Amino acid sequence: VVAVTANPGPVAPSRGALRPVGLHQVQLTGGFWGQRQAVNGTATIEHCREWLDRLGWTGNFRDPNAALRRRGREFSDSEVYKLTEAACWETARPGGHPHGELLAEFTALAAGAQAADGYLHTGYGRPGQPARYSDLNFGHELYCVGHLLQASVAAARTGAAPGLLDVARRAADHACTQFAHSGFCGHPEIEPGLVELYRVTGEERYLAQAAAFIERRGHRSLPEHEFGWRYFQDETPLRTADVFGGHAVRALYLANGAVDLAVETGDEDLLAAVIRQFDRTLARRTYITGGVGSRHLDESFGDDFALPPDRAYSETCAGVATIMLAHRLLLATGDTRYGDVVDRVLHNVIAAAVADDGRSFFYAHTLHQRTPAEVPPAEHEQLRFGGGQRAPWFEVSCCLTNVSRLLASLGTYLATEDDNGVQIHQYAPTRIEAAGMSLEVATAYPDAGDVTVTVLAAPADERTLTLRVPQWAGGGTHVERRVFTPGEQVRLDLAMRPRWTFPDPRVDAVRGCAAVEVGPIVMCAESIDQEDGVRLDELQVDTAVAPEANAVKGRSIRPVDEPWPYRNDRTTAEGPEPIVVPLVAYHRWARRGPSTMRVWLPTTPS
Amino acid sequence: VVAVTANPGPVAPSRGALRPVGLHQVQLTGGFWGQRQAVNGTATIEHCREWLDRLGWTGNFRDPNAALRRRGREFSDSEVYKLTEAACWETARPGGHPHGELLAEFTALAAGAQAADGYLHTGYGRPGQPARYSDLNFGHELYCVGHLLQASVAAARTGAAPGLLDVARRAADHACTQFAHSGFCGHPEIEPGLVELYRVTGEERYLAQAAAFIERRGHRSLPEHEFGWRYFQDETPLRTADVFGGHAVRALYLANGAVDLAVETGDEDLLAAVIRQFDRTLARRTYITGGVGSRHLDESFGDDFALPPDRAYSETCAGVATIMLAHRLLLATGDTRYGDVVDRVLHNVIAAAVADDGRSFFYAHTLHQRTPAEVPPAEHEQLRFGGGQRAPWFEVSCCLTNVSRLLASLGTYLATEDDNGVQIHQYAPTRIEAAGMSLEVATAYPDAGDVTVTVLAAPADERTLTLRVPQWAGGGTHVERRVFTPGEQVRLDLAMRPRWTFPDPRVDAVRGCAAVEVGPIVMCAESIDQEDGVRLDELQVDTAVAPEANAVKGRSIRPVDEPWPYRNDRTTAEGPEPIVVPLVAYHRWARRGPSTMRVWLPTTPS
C-alpha cells in the first residue's frame, strides 16, 4: 500500500534543479486562472462525464463482451482515465469540487473490465474483436494504459480513488511481460506513465520498461504507413534526433517520458537530446501562440518555418503536452525560459480552448479564420475540428479531458521550491506554502503586469524569493534573498506596453505581416469588432505607428477582382482609406458568434 | 450494335459552339507533346498494366469470390477501366502503339466479374464482402462504373475493345434500376459516363439517370461525415453553388457531367451555373500552375485565396479533370479563354506529372519543396504523396491511368471545327484534317513562340482559320478567312519574353513574392542549380530587374537563428550578397535527383 502524499502532483522527480510544489502548496484564489479552474471543477468534469455516458464510452467498460456494440474510437478508454485523473486533482485540491461518486464508479469500471492477466482495453481481444496488439500503429492499447497509469498516480497521491492503483499495476505488469523483449505502441504515453508509476511504487521494472520502449523506438520497426515512420517517432531514435517531428502529441508525450527517464537514471545525454529538440522546435516549428502542429492531414509538426496561420492545427492536446514538457525541463534544469513557454501556451492556447461556461472547446487553434463558422454546433456529437466555433464534444475528444486534468492540477505548475527558497514562475492570485514560507500573490495578470507578493509567514533564517521576468519584459529573474518578515511585500511591475511582433523571414506564410502582443497575450483582429465594410482580408496595418492595447492604425484596401489572380504588375489597391483596426485577445475570439479572425496582419509596404 | 466512329474521341456533344475533332483528325507528329504521347503508348500503359497485375488489382476480377484475398482500395477496379480507355485511344490513334492483347484480356476480366444482374464491382456483395451500396460515401461503386462507361465509349468509338460496350450497358442498366428513385455515389464520375453512353447508344434512360444523380445531389442526404457534406458536393445543389468546393476531383467530375447534361438537354441555367463556378474557381482557388486543391487532409479546394505553395495538393487527376472540363466548356461556348486554361494545366501540371521515361509520377504537385526527398522511391509500392520525388505507383494510384488516357487522346484537345473552318487552340507539331482542310502545324512551342500553319489541302470555297492567342501574348484570336490554297502558310509569333508575375494581395501564402513565367511555362528555382551556399529559403529576388529566361537577379540573405522566431523589430538580414538565381521550367523539377524548389520567390523590399 502506497501512502497518500502530503503534497500530491502529477510529476515528482527524485532529483533536479528545482522541486515541484504539490496541490496543497499552491492554491489559486481567483483571477484569470482561478475562475477557469473553478469552472473546470464545477462544469467541465461533469460535462465530460455526461458525454462519456451518452456516447457509451463508459458503457464499453460495463458491457465488455458486447464486441459488436462497442462505441467510440480505439482511444476512447483513455478519456475515462483522463477524466479520472482530472477528478482526482479536483477533489483533492484545496477549494476543489469533490467528485467522489464519479471516482468510485470509474474505478469500478476499470477494475471490472480488466482481464485476469491484467490486460485492459475494451476494444481488443474478446470474441468478435481484433486480437490484442494486432495493430501497434493505431491500436492505442498501451496509450490507454499510459493514461490509466497517470490516473492511478493521481489516485494514489491524493487518495481520491482507492483501488485504482491496483488496477494500474496489474495493467503495467501485463505490459511489462507482454513487451519484455520487443514492440512498442504507435502512440507514446505509457512511457511517462510508467516512470511516474515507478516513482509512486518504487518498482524498478516500470522504469526499465519505459527505458526499453524509448530505446526501441526510432528504428523503423513499426509497420510501414503512408504517413511515414516519422509520424510515429520511429524514423530516428529520440537520442539522436534534432527536432520534434511527426504527430505532435505523440512526439511530445514521448519527450515527456524521456525527460522523466533521464532524470531518474541520471542520463544527461538523453536529457540533452530532448532539450536540443525542444530548442529547435521553439525556434523553427512553433506558432506565436506557443501552439505546435501545422498539418491537419497527419496532425504533425511541419517542416522548419512551415507555419501557415490559416491551417494551423495547434491541437489543444499538444498545448497541454508542451506545458507538461516545459514544466519537467524547468524542474530538471531550473532554466526560467521554460516558464516563458508555459506562460505563452497557457494564455494563448489553453485559455482559448475552453468556452466561458466550460462546456465547449476548440480542438485545433487556427490563427486565421477566413470564413465565419456557418452555424453554432448543435447539441449532438461534433465531428469537425476546424470550424471556427467551439464544440461540445468531438469524435476524437482527447483535448477536453486533457485540458481538464491540466486545469485541476494547475497550481502545481505555477511555482517551485529548492533548498534556498521559492521560485514563482506564473503569476496569478495564489496562496503559496513552500520552503517554509507562506506567501500571498496578488495580481491582475495577464490583464495587467503588477505582481505583489506578501509574506504571510517565513522562517527565521534567510530565504531566496525568485520571480520570473518574462522575456517580453526583459527576461531572467527578479531575486530577493534575506530573512523575510511577515507583512513585507515584494513587487514586480511588468510593463505591458503593446508591441509589434514580426516573423523570421523564413516563415513564408506570414511574410509581410505583423502581430500585436500585450504582455503574454497575443492579440487578433476579429471581424465582429471591425467597422462596417472593413474585411479582414482587405486591410493593411501601419507598423510605423505604435499599437494601442486594443487597436492599431491601418487602411482598408480594395483589391480588384480579376478573372485570374496573378498579374504582371504589382497591383496598387484602389482607394485605400485610413482605418482603425480594433483588436481583441486571441483567447477571446469566437466567443460572440461566428466571425473571421486573423492574428497576423498584412502591413503597409515600407 | 453501334458502329465504330470514323472520328473517335472521348466527348461528342450533339450541339455546341464548336465541334470536337477526333483522334483521326489531329495527329501529333513530334515535339513536346508528341514525345510524351509516344512514351505513354510504349512505356506508361505497359508500366501500369504490370503494377495492376503485381498488386492483384486485375486479379480481383479473375478471382471474384475470394473476398478475403481482395487487394487494393475500393476504387482499384477503376484503374483497370481507365487503363482500358487509354489503351483504346492509343491503339486507335494514327501512329499509336497497339494494345490489342491488353484490351482483349481486360474486356474479358470485366465481363467475367459482372454479376448476372449487371452489377460490377469486385469488392462488394459477395460472401464475406460488404453489402452492395452499403457505403455510398466512400464505396466508389458507381464511380468505378463511370470509368467503365467511359472506357466502353472509347471501345465503341474506336472498335478497339469489342464486347466492352455490352458489359457497360448491363452495368449502366443495373445502376439505373437500382437508383431509379434515390441515392447517388459519394464520388461523382458516373454522370459524365452516363451522358457519353447516351451519346453512343441513344438510350435516353442514361441521360435521365445522369440528370437524376446531378439534381439529387446537394441536399445533405449522404451520411454525415467529419469532412462535411461539401466534401461530396452534397452541401449545396450544383445549380445554385457559386464556386467549386470540397474534394477537387469529385467537384470537377461532377461539373463535367453537368456540362454534358446541360448541352444535351439545352439547359442553359445549368451550363451557366458551371461556368459561374469555374470562373470564380479560376479567380480565387487556382494555383499559378493551373492546379487546384490546396488541402492534403481532404484533397479539397480550400477557401478563396487560400493557396499555400508548400502544401499545394494540386492533384494530377484534378489537372486532368480541369482539362476535360475546360474542353467541354470550349466546345459549348467557343470562348477561347478555356484554351488558356488547358494550355496552362497541360504545361505546368500534366507535363510535371510524368517522368521522362513514363514510369514514375507525381500525384500531388507542390509549389515549394522545403526539404529534399530523402531517398528515391524503391521499386515497390510507393505510399506517400508529397515526397518531392516521382514514384512508380501509389496505394491510391488514380493519377497514372488518368494521365495516360489523357495523353493517348490528347490530339482531340488541340483543335476544333465548325461550319466556317478550323480553330487551333493548342500549339504542337500536328497534322490536322478538319472542315475540309488539311493542315500541318510546325512549332517549337512551348520552348519558343513561333507557330507556322501550312495548308496542305483546302476546298475551293472560303474557310476560317482561327488561332488562339494566349492571354500572356495579348489574348483573343488570330483569324484568317479566305479561300486557302495548298502551300500557303499562316504564321503566329508569340513573344516569349520572360515576365514577373505577382499574386493578388489576398493570396496570403505568397505575399511579398513574385514568380517568373515564360510563355505558358511557370518557372521555378531548384536547389540543384544554385551556387554553393545559396539556400532557396534565404534569398530575395529583385523585381526591378527584368527576368531572363533562365535566371533572375537577387541577393542571398542570412537570417539570424534566434531561439524564438518572432521579434519586436523587423530583422535586417545580415550581409546580403548579390546573386544570380538560375531558374528551370517547373515541369522539369525533381528530374535530377532530390532537391528543394520554389516557384514563388521572396522579393527585396520595394
Image (spheres, coloured by chain):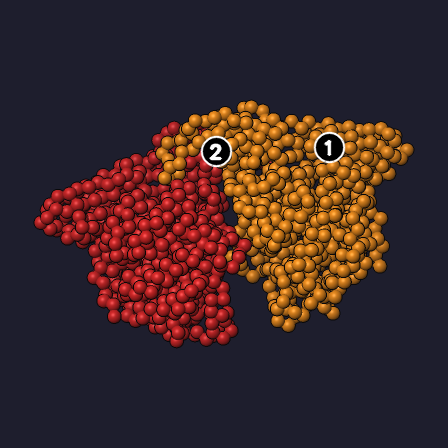
Chain colours: A red, B orange
Q: Is residue B68 left or right of residue A204?
A: right
Observer-nearest of B383 and A205: A205
Crowding near the residue tagged with mark 2, few <14, some 14–19, many ≥20 C-alpha atoms within 10 Å:
some
- Whether residue A457 can be seen here: yes
> Earlier along the polypeptide chain: callout 1 or callout 2?
1
Where's residue B38, x and y in %?
75, 44
Tell me the residue at 54%/49% (across/down).
B296
Residue A303: which disc?
Answer: none
- For the image, the number of numbered tags is 2
Where's residue B554, x and y in %?
52, 27
Tell me the residue at 81%/45% (across/down).
B94
Where's residue A156, x and y in %?
27, 66
Vertical order, B474 against B94 (above or below): above
Secondary structure type for disc 2: loop
Secondary structure type for disc 1: loop
Q: Is residue A151 left or right of residue B249?
A: left
Q: Amino acid at mark 1?
A: Ala
Q: Is residue A261 left or right of residue A565?
A: left
- Whether residue B203 can be seen here: no
Give the residue at mark 2. Answer: B538
Tell me the residue at 73%/44% (across/down).
B37
Q: Amino acid at mark 2?
A: Glu
Give the residue at mark 1. Answer: B444
Observer-nearest of B300 and A262: A262
Where's residue B118, x and y in %?
73, 66
Crowding near the residue tagged with mark 1, few <14, some 14–19, many ≥20 C-alpha atoms within 10 Å:
some
Residue found at the very far top of the displayed protein: B545
Q: Quadrant of the N terminus of chain A?
A: bottom left
